[in-house]
Image (tube, rainbow, N blue to C red):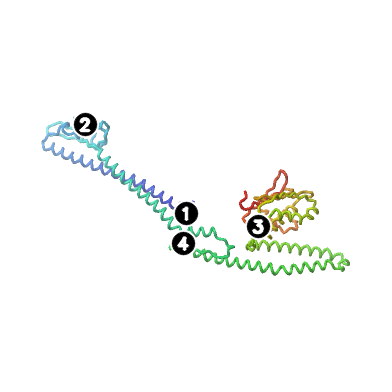
Amino acid sequence: MKLLAATTRYYLALAAVLFAVGSAGLYYGVNRALRHEVGEQLAARQRELTQQVQAGQPLPAPPFDTGLALSPRPRPEGFADTLLLDAQEHEMVPHRQLTFALRPPGGAPVWVTLRKSLVESDDLVAVILTWMLGVLAALLAGAALLNRWLTGRLWAPFRHTLGALRGYDLHQHRPLQLPAPAIAEFAELNQALTHLSERLVADYDNLREFTANAAHETQTPLAIMQAQLEQLLQLPALGHDPAAAPLLAELYGATRRLSRLHQALGLLSRIENRQFAAAVPVRLDELLAEKARHLGPLFEARSLALHLHAPAAPALHMHPGLADSLLHNLLHNAIKYNEAGGDVTACLTARTLEISNPGPDPGGDPARFFERFRKHRAASESAGLGLSIVQQICAYYGFRVAYTFEAAGRRHVLRVFFAGGDA
């Protein structure tokens, strides 16, 4: 729930409670005041009749006073409410009555009942309540509309800031450009976010520079080590020392793995730093056929059959090096984690690229296979960066990559959904 909606709900709930309590209090207060007024009128009439009887004057006859009833029999005294039939309206009408006893001089006591209709009082209560409730309802609705308009106007800078944060990309190498609104709190927030983005850009640039320098400085020593180890392995003197050759071979293999790891990490860093800006139309069908020819000896060495289904497809705008790396890592992954005598099937369409191979169920969460240094087998000499590179290239161009294991055919399936393709 949004903050504004929650605040408005609390305000409306409080207003509704006050509205209900105020309406009930207004009704009972006005009704009681009018009934008290009617009671005072009946009491004044009682005093008038009492003074009239004490002065020796006769009581008025009931036919001449419609609000008066006389009875020689005792009746309950005091105020009471009753319903009487209205001869003109032919309906029961509420009345307020007062009963008391009078004793004329030298005569028997008489119980007098004075009545007054409450129709006018009820009509007055209804009119007052209608107008008051109408005014309160209009006030409540007006307050809600005014609050909605004010929140939309006053919180516009916050929504602008939120939109700028959603669209912010650190790879653009520039801090946020937020205005200074008139509201002090929002101006302070924008200032803090601007300073934060400036520090992020500075730290990101420093990290990029460090990564580039580290990659440059380690590349040359690795190449020198690899070249010198190759020369050592070719020396005739190694034949006289059987223990030296295996040690140098292991050292040479470790150096090559370190070199491949360096190249993979450098490629990931350049992708993340968006250093592959140049994009040209690349025909993936032609590039896939070329990669298949280059990897032909590796397929033969492992007795793997290659099934290539790559009809002519529209060209994709990609950096040629990233397109080559994408196909290379996908095919190498299918070769590396294949079964003896298995196959690699590659299907390319205008929307997807699918590469599958047989193999045992690896188990675990498929999404974790794209993590860096994630290996299917712990003893594997692979650096575990192939699928991470594939994922970074796909994210760079807005593609989506997904891995599934089809238990029915015991096949690993990697699918790349191009931009605009069905995910």
Residue visible at 25% across and 32% down?
89
**Disc 2 + disc 3, Cβ < 8 Å:** no
Q: Earlier in the sequence, mark 2 or mark 3?
A: 2
Left or right position of 170 against 297 = left
Left or right position of 85 against 13 = left
The extreme right residue here reads 240
Q: Nearer the viewer, mark 3 or mark 1?
A: 3
**Residue type of the residue flagged with mark 3:** Pro
Q: Earlier in the sequence, mark 2 or mark 1?
A: 1
Q: Residue under circle 3?
A: 281
Q: Nearer the viewer, mark 2 or mark 1?
A: 1
Label 2 CA crowd tier, 10 Å (few <14, some 14–19, many 20+): few
Q: Is residue 359 visible?
A: no
Left or right position of 152 against 329 = left
Checking the image for residue 87, the label placed there is none
Q: Residue under circle 1?
A: 3
**Nearer to us in this view, 221 or 267:** 267
Q: Nearer the viewer, mark 4 or mark 3?
A: 3
Q: Provide the secondary structure element on which disc 2 rests.
A: loop
Label 4 CA crowd tier, 10 Å (few <14, some 14–19, many 20+): some
Quote the CA–CA distance across marks 2 and 4: 81 Å
Left or right position of 213 against 336 = left
Checking the image for residue 74, the label placed there is 2
